[in-house]
């Protein structure tokens, strides 16, 4: 555990593990730096993993107002935390909410991103009416979390169709995921929705063509919504490929950890070979 102080008493907790080139991990909503499961063990054999507790989650600060949770601020804070470890440029891996954050960093702070890996992520909502409806729904859910508490919310969250395929995971892994969700703070989760929910974040559709670093967009083959989004994003980005993870739903990195680890490692090793040869080996699209 390393609590990186930023400003005004705010800090981000970062768990460092493994060895090798740096790979930053950004978890999903209700997750933490410790919720990557077997994937972290597999990737840690080749990379220095810097798993961030995103604001409002894990052991990071949980400010009282939503301002610090805004996507723009969360992106700057995550990059500043990596600078504190001495890494000006890293590969970034984000899942779901963390994937949206990683994509935002790639779009607005590209000097910090060597390669980009997303799992079950999106560029936000392009339609203003849809975005406002989602923002209102997230605000209502935030109020519900604060009123009913985390255990009631986790029961609701785990019942969503989006996570149905996680029922196939081993019982021990399901218990570990649930413990991690229950360890969250109601206020932190609520403000996370208000500040960096899908409705609150600035949409990135018009900026996808400017995200030029090599990018790998993973989505579970059983997660039809996000496989479609990954395909659309890959078509808009200059050097991106979309990969469907067989037999997996939204949390493909948990449901098919070995497959994802092999695919991610192969993708990151392409970058190492390019550096050895002093140039690009091709986009692979």
Image (cartoon, helix red, strand yellow):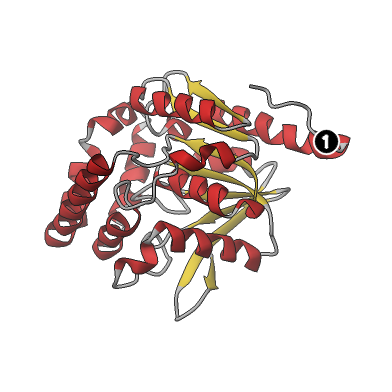
Quarter of the image for the C terminus: give it.
top right
Q: Nearer the viewer, residue 238 or 12?
A: 238
> Going by the image, does 177 lie left or right of 259?
left
Q: Looking at the image, is 140 positioned above or below residue 38?
A: below
Residue 284 is left or right of residue 189, and the answer is right
The residue at 56%/47% (across/down) is 106
The residue tagged 1 is 279
Residue 53 at x, y percent in the picture: 46, 58
- Relative side of 234 to 146, left or right: right
Q: Is residue 141 above or below residue 167?
A: below
Q: Is residue 257 visible?
A: no
Q: Which residue is found at the position 42% from the left and 19% from the top? A: 247
Q: Secondary structure at mark 1?
A: loop
Residue at left offset 83%, top offset 35%: 279
Percent coordinates x, y for residue 163 in the rendering: 29, 33
Furthest residue toward bottom: 8
- Which is more toward the observer, 228 or 128? 128
Q: Percent from the top left, x then y, of residue 134? A: 23, 45
Residue 64 rendering spot, x and y as whole percentages: 29, 73
Q: Is residue 254 above or below residue 5?
A: above
């Amino acid at each position: 555990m390393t609590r990186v102080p930023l400003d005004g008493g705010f800090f981000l907790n970062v768990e460092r593990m493994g060895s090798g080139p740096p790979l930053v991990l950004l978890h999903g909503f209700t997750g933490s730096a410790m919720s990557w499961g077997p994937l972290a063990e597999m990737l840690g054999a080749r990379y220095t993993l810097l798993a961030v507790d995103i604001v409002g989650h894990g052991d990071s600060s949980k400010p009282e107002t939503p301002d610090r949770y805004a996507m723009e601020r969360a992106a700057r804070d995550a990059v500043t935390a990596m600078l504190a470890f001495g890494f000006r440029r890293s590969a970034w891996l984000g899942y779901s909410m963390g994937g949206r954050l990683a994509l935002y960093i790639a779009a607005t702070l590209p000097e910090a991103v060597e390669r980009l890996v997303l799992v079950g992520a999106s560029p936000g909502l392009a339609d203003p009416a849809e975005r406002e409806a989602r923002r209102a729904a997230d605000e209502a859910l935030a109020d519900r979390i604060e009123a009913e508490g985390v255990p009631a919310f986790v029961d609701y969250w785990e019942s969503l169709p989006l996570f149905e395929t996680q029922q196939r995971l081993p019982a021990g892994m399901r218990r570990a995921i649930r413990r991690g969700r229950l360890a969250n703070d109601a206020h932190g989760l609520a403000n996370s929705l208000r500040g960096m929910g899908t409705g609150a974040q600035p949409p990135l559709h018009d900026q996808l063509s400017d995200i030029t670093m090599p990018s790998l967009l993973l989505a579970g083959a059983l997660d039809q919504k996000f496989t479609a989004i990954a395909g659309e994003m890959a078509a808009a980005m200059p050097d991106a490929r979309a990969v469907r993870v067989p037999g997996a739903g939204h949390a493909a990195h948990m449901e098919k950890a070995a497959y994802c680890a092999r695919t991610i490692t192969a993708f990151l090793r392409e970058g190492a070979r390019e550096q050895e040869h002093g140039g690009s080996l091709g986009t692979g699209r």
